[in-house]
Amino acid sequence: MAIDISPMVSLGLGLNLWTGYDDYSYDDLMSWDSMNWNNFNQSIDNDVSGFNAITGILFRPSPWLSIAATLESPLKLKVNESYAETFEESILGVYTSDSFSGNYEYKISRPFRGALVAAGARSRQDHIQLCTG
C-alpha cells in the first residue's frame, strides 16, 4: 500500500507473510541375498511460517531525479520439524532393527535491513527513452 503525501513524496507500507514447507526422504536398500541385506529410511518434514513489515519513502526532488529508501523489520521464522529414521538388517538370517523419531520447533531470525537508491536521467527526453525502451 502506498500514498502520495505530496507531488514530491510518496510513502509505502507492506506486510509480508512467509509460509512454506520442505519434505525430504531418503531410502537405501542394499541386498546381497535373501539372508543378507540392510535397509535405511530417513524423512525430514519442515513447516515454516513467519512475518515482517517493510516501509519505504520515495522523494522526487526534480523531474530527472528520484531517491528512495526502505526499511524492513526483522524477519522471524518459526520452523516445525518432524524427523524419523529406521534401520533394518538381516545378517545370516538374523533380523535386527532400530528406529528414531522426534519433533522439533525452532526459530530463525534476520535483523533489520534497509536500502537507499537513487535514479536519474540527464534530461526529460532521456527519461522518456529509458522508460519506454
Image (cartoon, rainbow, N blue to C red):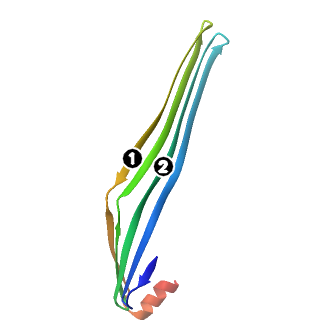
- Give the x, y percent position of residue 108: 38, 49
Q: Which mark is residue 33?
A: none
Binning the other alpha carbons within 10 Å of mark 1 as few (below 14), some (14 to 19) or many (20 upward) gives few
Tally of marks? 2
Q: Residue at x 58, y 15 (%)?
A: 89
Q: Is residue 35 above or below residue 102?
A: above
To which residue does mark 1 refer?
107
Q: Secondary structure at mark 1?
A: strand
Q: Residue at x 48, y 60 (%)?
A: 17
- Give the x, y percent position of residue 55: 37, 72
The amino acid marked with disc number 2 is: Val
Q: First in sequence, mark 1 or 2: give its number.
A: 2
Q: Residue at x 55, y 21 (%)?
A: 87
Q: Residue furthest right?
A: 34
Binning the other alpha carbons within 10 Å of mark 2 as few (below 14), some (14 to 19) or many (20 upward) gives some
In the image, 43 versus 73, the foreground residue is 73
Q: Which mark is residue 48?
A: 2
Q: Is residue 91 left or right of residue 55?
A: right
Q: Secondary structure at mark 2?
A: strand
Q: Is residue 12 above or below residue 60?
A: above
- Give the x, y percent position of residue 90: 60, 12
Q: Are marks 1 and 2 in contact (CB under 8 Å)?
A: no
C-alpha separation, residue under disc 1 versus residue under disc 2: 9 Å
Which corner quadrant of the image does residue 125 belong to?
A: bottom left
The amino acid marked with disc number 1 is: Lys
- Give the x, y percent position of residue 128: 47, 90
